[in-house]
Amino acid sequence: MGALRVGVLAYPGCFASEVFGVPDLLTIAKHVAGADPAGYEVAIMSSRRRVIAAGGVALAVSALREVDVLVVPGFEVGPGVDAKLAALSPEIAAIRAHAATGNAVVSICVGAFLLAEAGLLHGRLATTSWLFADELARRCPDTDVRCERLVVTDTGVTTTAAFSAVYDFALELIREHSGADVARTTARIALLDDARTSQTPYVEAGLLPKPGNKFSRRVMRHLDQNLAARYDLGALAGTFAVSTRTLLRRFAEETGQSPLGYLQASRVRRARHLLETTDRTVSGIATAVGYRDAGTFAALFAKHTGRRPSHYRATFRRSSAVASQK
């Protein structure tokens, strides 16, 4: 196997950390692999002669050339996403041309929006930063956006979550090209978690766009105020003077999910807070958020976050001592 040619597409306003993340980790992997001939040739490329990244960082770039893997970093979103995408038409054309060769394309974070503009996410699974997943889904209704995933690959197109997910992708690339041992050692040297699979543990619900209209928000508020109560669809519908069928239909139309799905996610959010800030046992937390059986709670928590409650606490426990016993 020859050297894998990797090109990072730099452009105005891109995040420099997402430009250099892949080259830096591949450099470490080359040292770990030693005499292994299956190395990497990495270039930071652009369709422009001069590139200023987000924060005013000037990047040295080379001309576009054919590569085996094209990496598209994310950019500083802010207001006016449409205007920013319109200004990046040369990059979108370059992405589209590269994809036409049949070689792999990878986006980091909101670089997925550039892939979408190039027409590469049509009918595919994809992910992006949890903060912008709803916006990507709105723009690409024929794309199955998996907002909980860190890395999604679908027929030659890979999308990843935000910032640090550049390393999750790079480790997968190293694992495929240089083997599991090289990837594992590279992760240890760089102090990276090579076993994480979900971005859900990092979601801050307060930053998410508020879904739904007045009806669904009232239902959500009621569920949030009664997290520990047994879920009873009939009683819930009665509270809002509608039939169960009407409740399910209206809630789904406004939020894209069921009341039970929302309740489970809300219970997990509360449990995450308690695991981070209190000394309560897992069993006690399970009871506090409406589960009599700690095993059932642990399974649901792992499904939503990718981690068992005890592992989550060990990873995300706030350094400030226990704040409360709420």
Image: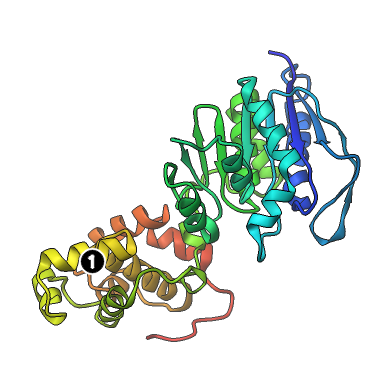
Q: Residue 166: where, in percent of width, then height? A: 65, 45
What residue is rendered at 79% in x and 58% in y?
A: 54
In this view, the residue in front, 309 or 211, is 211
Can see residue 41? yes
- Point out the image quarter for the C terminus: bottom left
What residue is rendered at 37% in x and 56% in y?
A: 304
> Can you say whether 160 is above or below 325 in the image?
above
What residue is rendered at 76% in x and 45% in y?
A: 19
What residue is rendered at 50% in x and 51% in y?
A: 139
Element class at badge 1 = helix
Q: Which image quarter: residue 100?
A: top right
> Can you say whether 189 is above or below 276 in the image?
above
Q: Residue 277: where, in percent of width, then height? A: 47, 78
Task: Judge from the rendering whether residue 271 lies leftward or rightward of residue 59; answer left or right.
Answer: left
Q: Residue 140: where, in percent of width, then height? A: 48, 46
Can see residue 294? no
Q: Which residue is mark 1?
A: 250
Q: Amino acid at mark 1?
A: Arg
In this view, the residue in front, 138 or 127, is 138
Task: Judge from the rendering whether residue 210 lies leftward or rightward of residue 238; answer left or right.
Answer: right
Q: Residue 95: where, in percent of width, then height? A: 68, 33
Task: Judge from the rendering whether residue 59 lies leftward or rightward of residue 74; answer left or right.
Answer: right
- Point out the image quarter for the N terminus: top right
| Mark 1, other Cα within 10 Å: few <14 / some 14–19 / many ≥20 | some
